[in-house]
Structure formats: structure tokens, C-alpha cells
Image (cartoon, rainbow, N blue to C red):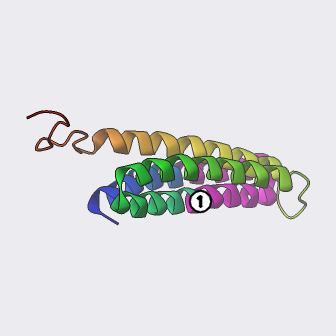
Amino acid sequence: MQANDVRLLKGAAIPTLLVGLVVVVVAALVAGGKGALGAAIGALVVCVFFTLGIVAISYAGRVSPMAMMTAAVVTYAVKILIVMALLKAFENATAFEPKAFGWGAVVCTVAWTIGEMRGFMKLKMLYVDPDGKTPGSG
């Protein structure tokens, strides 16, 4: 991973972990121990999936910009579909509170996405190659 990728990962993971802790505490107050466990599992799933997504995008970015964009779109779609499938699969779970799992996953997904957007805005990356040649010119 490049330094920019690590900064982006930290910019998304730290707020998500903090929000996840708040969700776990709220779930514990509302639904007890099973609620806290469900919210913790939801937050953990989001952190793991989205971290793997950033790693995949970072790897694809070393290949080419087109591969990076394709990896970004595909990994985001796959992450969302897997989280939705887990929400559906765990809707009748008895080991933990499924609603707390769902709320934990949704709230942490939103926190991760906001943290990632903020991290991208703070990165000082060139999106135009200043030394690049324009096709068709001289």
C-alpha cells in the first residue's frame, strides 16, 4: 500500500471504529448483551470488508488507472451486496440481536463512506498529469 492509501484507510477506519463503539453502547443500553454483540459484529463486518476493498483498489491502482476505477466500482458493489446478504441471513439469528447487527452495519457503512470521502478530499493528489502530452498536439 502506498502512503496515500494508508492515510485514506486511517481516515475512514478511525471514525468508523468510534461510531461503532457508540453503536455498541447504544445497542447494549437498548437490547442488552445480545444487542451489543450484534452491533459489534455488524461494525466488524463493515470494517473488514471495506478495508479489503481499499487494499484491492490500492493493488489495482498499481496496475493502471482503468483497473483502479474498475476495482473501485466492483468492490463497492460486492461489499454492499454481501452486507445486504448478511443482513438477510441474520434476520432470524438467536445468538445476537439481528436488528442491532443491521443498525451497526448500516451506521458503520455510512460512517466509513463519509470518512473515505473526507479522506479523499484531504489527499493532495494530482488528478491531471502536469507533464502529460495531449494526444494529437504537435
> Within 10 angstroms of label 1, few (less than 14), some, or many (20 or more) residues?
some
Residue name at image x 61 percent, y 55 percent: 46
Q: Residue 105's x, y, as percent?
A: 67, 49
57 left or right, relative to 133:
right
Q: Where does residue 59 sit, x and y in percent of width and height?
A: 41, 64
Could you tell me the amino acid type at mark 1?
Phe
**Quadrant where the N terminus is found in the figure:** bottom left
Which residue is nearer to you in this view: 4 or 112?
A: 4
Q: Determine the secondary structure under disc 1.
A: helix
* Residue 110 quadrant: top right
Q: Nearer the viewer, residue 69 or 32?
A: 69
Q: Left or right of 19: which side holds 91?
A: right
User: Relative to residue 36, is residue 125 drawn left or right?
Assistant: left
Residue 8, given in percent of the width and then of the height, sits at 37, 52
The residue beneath circle 1 is 49
Q: Is residue 65 left or right of residue 73?
A: left
Give coordinates of residue 52: x percent, y percent: 53, 63
45 drawn magenta: yes
Which residues are drawn in magenta? 19-48
